[in-house]
Image (cartoon, rainbow, N blue to C red):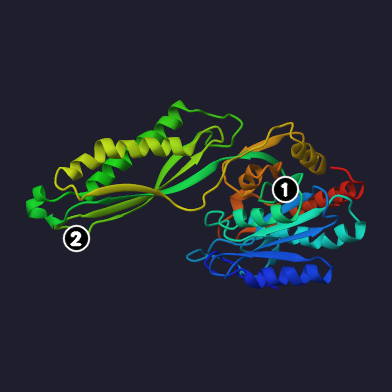
Amino acid sequence: MSFDTTSNRSNLPLIEFVREYLAELGVESHLTYDDAGEKANLFATIGPLDRPGVILSGHTDIVPVASQKWTVDPYTVTQRDGRLYGRGTADMKAYIAVTLAFAKVFRDRGIQIPIHYALSYDEEVGALGAPRLIEDMLERVPLPAACIVGEPSYMNVVKAHKGKIVCRAEFTGVEAHSGVAHIGANAIEAAGKTIAHISEVGRRYRDEGPHDAAFEDPKYTTVQICLVDGGTAVNIVPNFASFDFDIRHLPSQDPYEILGEIREFIERSALPELRRVSDKTEATVIVHPGGAIALDTAEDDPVIRLAKALTGASETRKVVFGTEAGYFQRAGISTVVCGPGHIDQAHKPDEFVEIEQIALCEQFFHKLADRLSAGQL
């Protein structure tokens, strides 16, 4: 069975498959849809509905394979040399598959603490589905006691990750023949001046911090220019320019304070040169929907103790990639990231997860079933 759930496609065939699979086990699923009705989250519970449970969280969408050189069919799982190859094997369908394989185990064991399945859409394009999923979940069940987000952590216990906002700066100037450039307002120059400033901001955080030594590299907040556009022809003063940038911040920092500094620079240094020609020129910065909320779970949080017990780990990690975990934590749920596979394999051609990682994940859920059957977290 194969489902292409690239973010620009519908995930409904996969969601309907999961719903039917759970229904055969006597488990009811609840769906929440995107505005177009073309994608859906799935929420389902095994066990009693009157007490706090454990969420198993995973996103169903994957990133594109376009322009990547694969040696296997990206949409068919290929087993080779102790690995399972295919798009999403690491990020993060292997985790989802294992959790679903354990649905019958949870049901048959008569768990005293409920398990909640929380499968989302559009995580890869800004965690767009998770907020609706969580809102629906909180209307149906008591506030869960714990959430395990199965992003690829090599079955290590991840207690923290960076947050991210994605922004676009847009500049409107005045067109003119480049031979009489003095009567035009060059939007690209204003954008370039701002890009240079943002690069300086990024270098300042790199050199001066704050730094968090517990994080994987880079151990500081990054501000990165990602896309640039502007201009019409080489003999026209450009009347438009734009660029996209992201701020990937430590949990201790507020990205909107950084964004405020950038906006203040534009108002003080970039916009006046445009306005010298015309008061109709503009410069704006918008924040794209989605992004990632930082995760920052305390070392002594019960979900950390649970994850350590299930994995046998003695230490925790802080990682630089984002997940939906921060959204669950914001809702008041103790949250940890722990799943099979390595993030280094995600989003690459010939993505894979090691079969040994699948086995470790299965051991994790066997132990979890034992604890929930005994009414223990």
Q: Nearer the viewer, residue 325 or 199?
A: 325
Mark 1 crowdedness (10 Å alpha carbons): few <14, some 14-19, many ≥20: many
Q: Which mark is residue 192?
A: none
How many marks can you see?
A: 2
Q: Is residue 268 left or right of residue 168?
A: left
Q: Nearer the viewer, residue 142 or 200?
A: 142
Q: Position of residue 263 (x, y in %)?
A: 35, 39
Look at the numbered discs 1 and 2 and tell me whether their residues touch, using CB distance below 8 Å.
Answer: no
Q: Nearer the viewer, residue 240 or 351?
A: 240
Q: Position of residue 298 (x, y in %)?
A: 69, 33
The residue drawn where x is 70% and y is 36% is 316
The Cα–Cα distance between marks 1 and 2, rounded to whole angstroms, is: 52 Å
Residue at the disc numbered 1: 148
The residue drawn where x is 42% and y is 43% is 224
Q: Residue furthest left?
A: 180
Q: Is residue 3 visible?
A: no
Quarter of the N terminus within the rendering:
bottom right
Q: In the picture shown, does residue 124 fall above or below 31?
A: above
At label 2, the amino acid type is: Ala
At label 1, the amino acid type is: Ile
Q: Residue furthest front?
A: 139
Q: Position of residue 253 (x, y in %)?
A: 51, 33
The residue drawn where x is 86% and y is 63% is 104
In this rendering, which labeled residue sits more in front, label 1 or label 2?
1
Q: Regarding mark 1 in the picture, which secondary structure is present there? A: strand
Mark before the other along the chain sequence, 1 or 2: 1
Q: Which mark is residue 233?
A: 2
Q: Is residue 268 left or right of residue 163?
A: left
Q: Is residue 245 visible?
A: yes
